[in-house]
Amino acid sequence: MPTTQAVQLPESSLSGPVSLEEALAQRRSIRGFSDHQVTLAEIGQLLWAAQGITEPRRGLRTAPSAGATYPLEIVVIVGRAEGLAPGVYRYAPGRHALTPLLQDDQRQSLTRAALNQSALLQAPVTFAVTAVHARTESRYGQRATRYVDMETGHAAQNLSLQAVALGLGSVVIGAFDDQDVAALLDLPPGEAPLYLIPVGRPR
Ligand SMILES: Cc1cc2nc3c(=O)[nH]c(=O)nc-3n(C[C@H](O)[C@H](O)[C@H](O)COP(=O)(O)O)c2cc1C
């Protein structure tokens, strides 16, 4: 039976040993990863950096959003993680929890859908930034396309810098087959994948 129970993520940390300046200076695209598992706490911290709620009263997040329309979603493809079964999960920022979408290690199919880029096969976990453009289009019309792309950059950079601060590496991947990735992740109509970000311990 597929598990449908949400996975609560550990509370995110607001301090760490690496300064923002050090993280900026050290960030480099990493495409080769060791066999080390990532932990549930690391996954939670990376998700918080990308889209975590920092002002619960108004639901505001770590990354800015045009008119606070929040079109972005984060889908997590888990291969090897301590405390989390292989599979595909969706981040629920309001609960800081993961909702299971699919079971089993999907990294081979994900790699195939992205021009066989080996970073996706090696990385213990990949974060897909996806967007529901309609949320932002309802307020901004055609300009939403630009706003959603900008927001994706904000979220991805937050995640990339948090990875450095955790002693992890990442690369942002924009080259993939949109339809194949959407089908693999079982995205509902109207939700598009924009970035794949494999993360792991640098090899
Ligand atoms: C929009 C965008 C798309 C990218 N797509 C890919 C990709 O598909 N595969 C990949 O290995 N790197 C990808 N990159 C990473 C760049 O190759 C990388 O940032 C660049 O070589 C500079 O190196 P640095 O990130 O270490 O500073 C992408 C970067 C951006 C900004």
Image: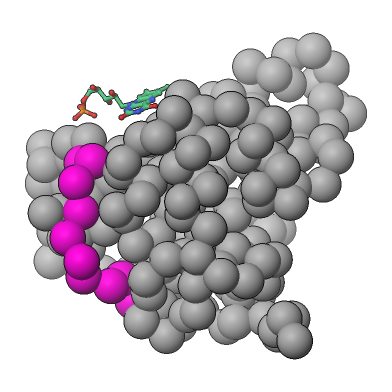
Residue placed at 69% from the left, 31% from the top? 179
Looking at the image, which is closer to me, 197 or 120?
Answer: 120
Describe residue 108's horizontal placement relative to residue 53 as left or right: left
Image coordinates of residue 201 in percent, x first then y, are 19, 60
Furthest residue toward top:
142
User: Looking at the figure, which quarter contains the N terminus?
Assistant: bottom right
User: Looking at the figure, which quarter contains the C terminus?
Assistant: bottom left
Q: Residue 178 colored magenta?
A: no
Residue placed at 33% from the left, 76% from the top? 39
Q: Can residue 46 be seen in this view?
A: no
| Image-quadrant location for residue 173 | top left
| Image-quadrant location for residue 119 | top left
Describe residue 12's horizontal placement relative to residue 51 as left or right: left
| Secondary structure mostly seen in the magenta stretch | loop
Residue placed at 72% from the left, 43% from the top? 183
Position of residue 127 relative to residue 143, above or below, is below
Position of residue 69 relative to residue 18, above or below, is above
- Write the start and end of the magenta stretch as one range: 30-39
